[in-house]
Image (cartoon, grey):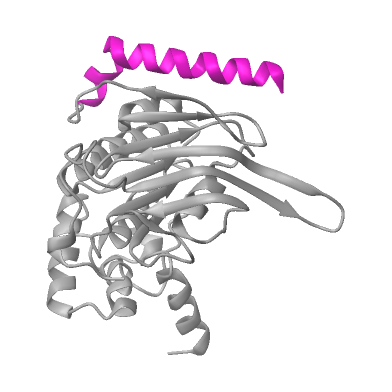
Amino acid sequence: MPKGRATSERAAAEEAPAERTSAERAPTAGAGAGVGAASVQLDDVQVRFRSKKRDVTALSDISLDVSPGEFVAIVGPSGCGKSTLLKLVAGLLTASSGEVLLGGERVKGPRHDIGYVFQRAALLEWRSALRNILLQAEMRRMPAARARARADELIRMTGLTGFEDAYPHELSGGMQQRVALCRALLHEPPVLLMDEPFGALDALTREQLNTELNRIWRTTGTTVLLVTHSISEAVYLADRVVVMSPRPGTITEIIEVGLPAERDYGETLGRPEFRAAAARIRELLGAVSAQD
């Protein structure tokens, strides 16, 4: 294999962090609420970026506890620090002050036990869908039989059956994101971070993937933090929605959605709980925009 490809494969797998045993799987969605240590905890976190010309405060006074198995969405104006918050949890950035914990353990550097899905699928063009998913297993040295069984399970779960041997250029944008999601979940991470994963997709595909993500979350019990600019997506998917202010990003309000875990897309959008939560978020973001 050319050196360039080997380097690219290492980089693509770094989003996918150390293997976990089945005994360490996250609890069923919502089952961990209020029990034991928070899955994700940020305590009075501030992030400042310093250069020769100026200092910029990206995040200020961020405190948030996310229970095991909970789905939390984060919305706010562009540039308010939503992606920065995810990078803190992943250990890709260090807080200027405050504390970030995963499972009660302080985050001191890049975490290899989480999953990370980005807006761009970042698949390797010379590898099939299945081999893109299994790339993570190769980098983690997961047992081959276990990795293949897990990959087959995820392929069935995401509707990719029959496309295992397809290459990225043969897949639609939505199918590429399904492959990226399978890759991120291969090692059964306790926490899944998602940074605008469906932002580049058409509306219909986005709705379909929202429905699939809700089902996958309920099936795996993984704790999810989702950054999105879509209010309806945030409310449909999440237990709670964190609304952030413009930079320096602070938490304006946390909205309890109040919907059951299992959600039919069309029926959910018509529920009073959905409409009330979405209206409140729009009100908060509208007020924020007026002040900016």
Q: Which residues are magenta?
A: 264-292
Where is residue 124 drawn, in percent x and y? 42, 70
Where is residue 50 drawn, in percent x and y? 76, 55
Which quarter of the rendered picture does the N terminus lie within?
bottom left
- Magenta: main secondary structure equals helix
Residue positioned most to the right: 53
Nearest the eye: 164 or 68 = 68
Name the residue: 34% across, 78% down: 139
Image: 37 above or below 130: above
Left-right relation of 203 to 68: right
**Observer able to see residue 178:** no
Image: 185 above or below 136: above
Is 263 contained in the magenta span?
Answer: no
Name the residue: 52% across, 46% down: 85
Image: 151 above or below 29: below
Name the residue: 29% across, 9% down: 272
Is 291 contained in the magenta span?
Answer: yes
Left-right relation of 9 to 70: right
**Observer able to see residue 20:** yes
Number of labels in the image equals 0
